[in-house]
Image (spheres, helix red, strand yellow):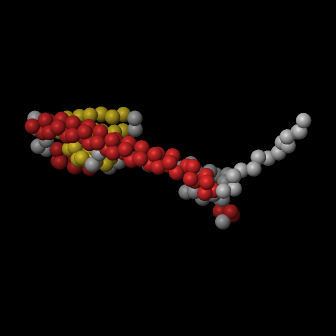
Amino acid sequence: MKKLKRGRKKGSTNVVNTLKGLTPLLYSLAIASTGIGIMSRAISEMFGEEIKIRLLEFKLMNVIEIEKRDRNKVVIEYYKLREINKYIKNFLKRNPKWKSEKENYAGIITGRIILTRIYRSYYKKRDDEEDICPKCGRYYEDD
């Protein structure tokens, strides 16, 4: 009986044959991802139209929907459509840490106004390590 050598198994050195074997797989993956992209875009446009229809109904009632986002809390409020620009302007003047934007859902401007609070990120100052850059965290002597 002949003993088999146990050693490192040699890999295929011919890369072209490996790529030829993977070509049908890569092609089918590309076709599938394109199809999923088209389908997801169509579904998101469908939902965007539903939102737009709902907000047009609010417009007939002279009401607009405003969403206020503050960390993990979302509050939806309804205001008169007539004085909304004045309300937004005064709100942003009184609350400078907030920003306003119109909702854009799947390329469709729905008409909702979103107010979002902006938080600054604070960095702790280290007294024992003064030779560290506060922005990137590297030591100055490494450069």
Is residue 92 at least partly visible in the picture? no
The quadrant in which residue 139 appears is bottom right
Q: Is residue 118 left or right of residue 104?
A: right
On the image, the x and y values in percent for residue 35 come to: 37, 44
**Which one is in front, 20 or 136?**
20
Q: Is residue 51 left or right of residue 81?
A: right
On the image, the x and y values in percent for residue 133 come to: 60, 58
**Which one is in front, 82 or 36?**
36
How many numbered marks appear? 0
Q: Quadrant of the N terminus?
A: top right
Is residue 25 at least partly visible in the picture? yes
Residue 56, above or below 124: above
Instruction: State the residue at coordinates (40%, 35%).
Output: 72
**Which one is in front, 42 or 48?**
42
Q: Residue furthest right?
A: 1
**Which one is in front, 63 or 1?**
1
Residue 54, above or below 107: above
On the image, the x and y values in percent for residue 13 come to: 69, 56
Q: Which residue lies furthest to the bottom in this view?
A: 143
On the image, the x and y values in percent for residue 131 come to: 65, 59
The quadrant in which residue 80 appears is top left
Instruction: State the residue at coordinates (76%, 46%).
Output: 9
Instruction: State the residue at coordinates (9%, 37%).
Output: 60
Q: Is residue 84 left or right of residue 128?
A: left
Q: In which quarter of the image is the C terminus?
A: bottom right
